[in-house]
Image: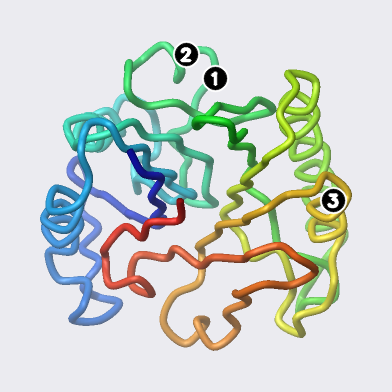
């Protein structure tokens, strides 16, 4: 029984969005994901998927992508990414599948860990950071705290967080998100969003006793990584 992580699946079974326009390594990337997934993950395992699941614009279009994920082995816990426009009400999403859970202001348990999370947003002090960005960022901080508070209230002391956006800016400065992780004693943070040239700003490893793990598909070679 293991806990794995991956992000940025960018599935497009119901729309015309070939990912190989971003490089040859993305050619038929869903086949790479499925082969790697089935080679190491069993029905007893759990996989965290940190956003950018599907290019679909609504839940009706996105169902084919979600059904593809549902057929893969293991339980899955998903948070929202910036391209997940198909994301509908959290209650509706969590009633869709037995083996897929969606995080929004809530948490899910893995053994004695609480898995918390939210989408996140571009951190302050980045280039082109606007008042609109600040508003969204502050809202995402609230959602993160709601998720963490729900886990603490339920008695969990060991916490893993997944966000879609990097928790620090391109200068690797401390952020409100990293401060929240420290405040709640988070053990591990997984995130994605970065691709191609942006992978030069990867923030990973142990910082202030928290392990940061990057799970973007093209960064981990489309192969879910084991984190516990």
**Residue 89 circle label:** 1
**Residue 117 percent location from the top left of the image:** 64, 41
Mark 2 vs mark 3: in front: 3
Task: Report the residue at 50% width, 24% height from top.
Answer: 88
Q: CA distance from mark 1 to mark 3?
A: 26 Å
Position of 83 with respect to 31 (left or right) is right
Numbered disc 1: secondary structure: loop
The one of 222 and 111 positioned closer to us in this rendering = 111
C-alpha distance separating marks 2 and 3:
29 Å
Mark 1, other Cα within 10 Å: few <14 / some 14–19 / many ≥20: few
Query: Dot 2, how many residues are within 10 Å of its Cα: few (below 14), some (14-19), or many (20+)?
Result: few
Q: Position of residue 159 (x, y in %)?
A: 67, 41
Q: Which mark is residue 174?
A: none
Q: Quadrant of residue 26?
A: bottom left
Give the labeled residue for mark 2: 92
Do callouts 2 and 1 mark residues in contact (Cβ within 8 Å)? yes
């Amino acid at each position: 029984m293991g806990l794995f992580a991956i992000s940025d699946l960018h599935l497009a079974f119901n729309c015309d969005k070939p990912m190989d326009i971003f490089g040859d390594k993305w050619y038929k990337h869903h086949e790479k994901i499925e082969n790697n997934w089935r080679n190491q993950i069993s029905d007893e395992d759990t996989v965290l998927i940190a956003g950018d699941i599907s290019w679909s614009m609504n839940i009706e279009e996105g169902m084919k992508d979600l059904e593809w994920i549902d057929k893969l082995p293991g339980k899955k816990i998903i948070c929202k990414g910036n391209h997940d426009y198909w994301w509908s009400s959290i209650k509706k999403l969590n009633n869709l599948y037995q083996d897929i859970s969606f995080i929004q202001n809530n948490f899910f348990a893995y053994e004695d860990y609480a898995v918390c999370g939210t989408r996140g947003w571009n951190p302050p002090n980045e280039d082109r950071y606007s008042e609109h960005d600040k508003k969204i960022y502050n809202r995402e901080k609230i959602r993160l705290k709601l998720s963490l508070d729900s886990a603490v209230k339920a008695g969990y002391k060991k916490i893993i967080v997944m966000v879609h956006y990097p928790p620090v800016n391109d200068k690797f400065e401390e952020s409100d998100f990293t401060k929240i992780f420290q405040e709640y004693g988070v053990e591990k943070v997984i995130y994605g969003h970065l691709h191609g040239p942006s992978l030069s700003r990867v923030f990973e490893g142990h910082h202030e006793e928290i392990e940061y793990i990057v799970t973007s598909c093209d960064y981990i070679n489309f192969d879910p990584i084991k984190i516990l």
